[in-house]
Image (cartoon, helix red, strand yellow):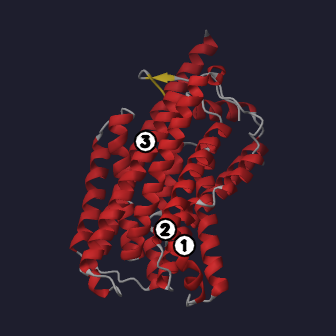
Amino acid sequence: MERSQELNVNGDQNLEANLIDHEVTESSSVPQTRNYKKWFRISIYVFFVLTCQTLSTILGRLYYENGGKSTWMVTVLQRIGFPVLFLYRFFSRDKQQENTDPSFIKFSSYTTLGLAYICLGLLASAVSYMSSVGLLYLPVSTFSLIFASQLAFTALFSYFLNSQKFTPYIVNSLFLLTVSSALLVFNNESQNIKDVSRVEYVLGFICTISASAGIGLLLSLVQLILTKVLKKPSFSAVMDMAIYQSLVSCFVVLIGLFASGEWKLLTSEMQNYRLGKVSYIMTLSSAAISSQVYTIGALGLIFESSSVFSNTITAVGLPIVPVVAVIVFHDKMDSLKIFSIILAIWGFFSFVYQHYLDEKKLKTCHTNHVEEDTQG
């Protein structure tokens, strides 16, 4: 995927400008048949995000429901499937484009990137473990609703790290998503969950909200690295970031699995798994693969369209999980939880609409910039 010169908007280098420039150039020079192929790829990535986001969460809970007890095992499942990213990068149509910028060959740049990968990997490990604990103690529907607050945390951390402006729509989204999660604290459904005490329910809530905050920080740091370190990122450079980050986090969670001693229980756990040994292996392997396919889908949407569109699809997918949880695990859907879902969806649309306005403004500015250069 070719990149033209980066547009400077409000003094900040913006990844969206590169992507929009690609879209504008492509629409004027690429045959209509190629546009059809592009939208076919986008539809595949959308399918990956919507299905694998739901599937990985459901499979994690299925493991717990049928005799699985290792939180570190569920944590490993979220990270160990990263070799799938190697395959996708190898077969990517953008694999020939190795360097993002001539200045990137400097040793200092590699050192900065190495430290960034390590920090992102450590943060991703912490997020994965806390989400595993949350999924252990909370119903899937409650877990997914609380985890949806990641959009609010993303906006909050982006305000400090990426100069994100707090517009009325962003403030509204922050408020709605915060209230949506806070309402679930007063839910008495811990009484209806087998072998889960009120204390464990609160612990699950705290771990899930912490994981959500960690995801928000992680996404904001990734955006910071894209704009300040990579500056003109190619598809292969971003894939490398995802791969090395996953490599670090996988190494960390494997250490956690063996240090905790939970690995000693895996053999007996597989033998006593209610659905059988084959189902045990299939559940774990499917969860690991689906987590990474979701990552491929999210990255693919960013480069075929924009990060705004990728966030939009992710936001649309989050409310799907509670519905599936009600069908698969028969989660109770009381009035408080329904009200929480309504607030969360409202917050999603408020968040997405603001980013739609930002992208529209950016695309208009960039189009005017291109027209001025053409006339000049």
Distance from Cα at disc 3 to Cα at disc 1? 34 Å
Tag of residue 220: 3
Res 322 → quadrant: bottom left
Vertical relation: 161 (above or below) 183? above
Comparing 8 with 23, the one in front is 8
Q: Secondary structure at mark 1?
A: helix
Location of residue 49 in the rendering, given as x and y in whole percent from the top left corner: 57, 59
Left or right of residue 146: residue 355: right
Sort mark 3 into few (<14), some (14-19) or many (20+) by Cα contacts within 10 Å.
many
Res 113 → quadrant: top right
Left or right of residue 39: residue 17: left
Vertical relation: 109 (above or below) 117? above
* Residue picked out by circle 1: 263
Looking at the image, do the residues carrying marks 2 and 1 touch, with CB atoms under 8 Å apart? yes
Q: Earlier in the sequence, mark 3 or mark 1?
A: 3
Comparing 135 with 38, the one in front is 135
Q: Secondary structure at mark 3?
A: helix
Residue type indicated by callout 2: Trp
Vertical relation: 247 (above or below) 359? below
Q: At 55% from the left edge and 27% from the top edge, which residue is drawn?
A: 231
Residue type indicated by callout 3: Ser
* Residue picked out by circle 2: 72
Q: Earlier in the sequence, mark 3 or mark 2?
A: 2
Location of residue 376 in the rendering, given as x and y in whole percent from the top left corner: 61, 9
Residue lying farthest top?
376
Distance from Cα at disc 2 to Cα at disc 1? 9 Å
Q: At 61% from the left edge and 29% from the top edge, which residue is drawn?
A: 21
Sort mark 2 into few (<14), some (14-19) or many (20+) by Cα contacts within 10 Å.
many
Residue type indicated by callout 1: Trp
Location of residue 63 in the rendering, given as x and y in whole percent from the top left corner: 52, 79
